[in-house]
Image (cartoon, grey):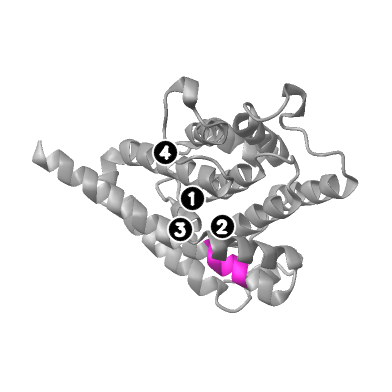
Amino acid sequence: MVVAQSDPLAPLAELPGVAAAGDEARETLGRAHRHRFNLRGWPASAGEASIRAARASSVLDGGSMLLANAGDADPILSGALRVAEALEGGATSLVGAWQRAPLQAIARLHALAASDLTDDDRLGRPRGDGDVARRLELLGDIITSGTRVPAHVLAAVAHGEILTLEPFGVADGVVARAVSRLITINSGLDPHGLGVPEMYWMRQSGDYKASARGFASGTPDGLTAWLIHSSRGLHAGAREALGIAQAMAEQGSAK
């Protein structure tokens, strides 16, 4: 694949192993979307994927995985579930906002994720740090300028950048993983949001956190490790999607 040399993310797509990991994820996500159940029943499998993604993302931010009664709900999980609902099935409102104004979409995701965790006047508002604001603006500029790197690279970069910056100081991990999901939906890599990479990242939480630190370091090895780990999550999440579809197909046959 040829990418424009003016594209600041182009060198990342050329790091060793990155293209192969992305191709593997893309192929398996395609299989998930072509599964016989998902040809018509994808809204049901997308809903199940959404719940699993929220629960796993909550755990990675120190929250609960267990759904509870409203009065006993974990605030981190509640926020992750609101985010997941907003993205479920490739919701057009957030996808459209992402295409026009990605920083507004990020702010909206934070408002959903953190409404039980912080004051209303802090929802969607990045910390008052000049470097944080500049880097978020740069990320927004890269996205809106039409970077030509594959979706798996852009998703990993945005995900890693938000984890690194912690722009809001609360619920940043939930927002970062939601942005990764939003990019895979918006790009057509996973248009219905059937994959559940969050489950892989939760199960491999030590590697996830170590790889994120590698991204933050900015070294070639650190960036490579993060990009590959992110794509491995997409691949594992696609396999989870296949499992969801197969289970639902078997349930339907049993009725």
Closer-to-camera residue (28/56): 56
Instruction: Compute the Cα span from label 3 to label 4.
Output: 16 Å
Neighbourhood count class around disc 1 (C-alpha, 10 Å): few under 14, some 14–19, many 20 upward? few
User: What SS does tag 4 mark?
Assistant: helix
Q: Position of residue 77 (x, y in %)?
A: 52, 35
Instruction: Compute the Cα span from label 2 to label 4.
Output: 23 Å
Closer-to-camera residue (107/123): 123
Q: Position of residue 184 (x, y in %)?
A: 52, 51
Vertical position of residue 226 compared to residue 246: above or below: below
Q: Position of residue 51 (x, y in %)?
A: 41, 38
Amino acid type of the residue tagged 1 in the rendering = Gly
Q: Which residues are magenta?
A: 225-230
Confirm whether residue 7 shows in the render: no
Neighbourhood count class around disc 4 (C-alpha, 10 Å): few under 14, some 14–19, many 20 upward? many
Give the position of the C terminus as an image quadrant: top left
Mark 2 or mark 4: name the one nearer the start of the chain.
4
Neighbourhood count class around disc 3 (C-alpha, 10 Å): few under 14, some 14–19, many 20 upward? few
Side of 77 relative to 124 (left or right): left
Amino acid type of the residue tagged 3 in the rendering = Arg
Side of 78 relative to 118 (left or right): left
Badge number at residue 168: none
Amino acid type of the residue tagged 2 in the rendering = Ala
Say if mark 3 contacts mark 1, CB within 8 Å: no
Q: Quadrant of residue 42?
A: top left
Badge number at residue 51: 4
Say if mark 2 contacts mark 1, CB within 8 Å: yes
Magenta region, main secondary structure: helix
Front disc: 2 or 4: 4
User: What SS does tag 1 mark?
Assistant: loop
Q: What residue is disc 2 on?
A: 151
In the displayed image of the protein, which residue is found farthest to the left?
Answer: 254
Badge number at residue 188: 1
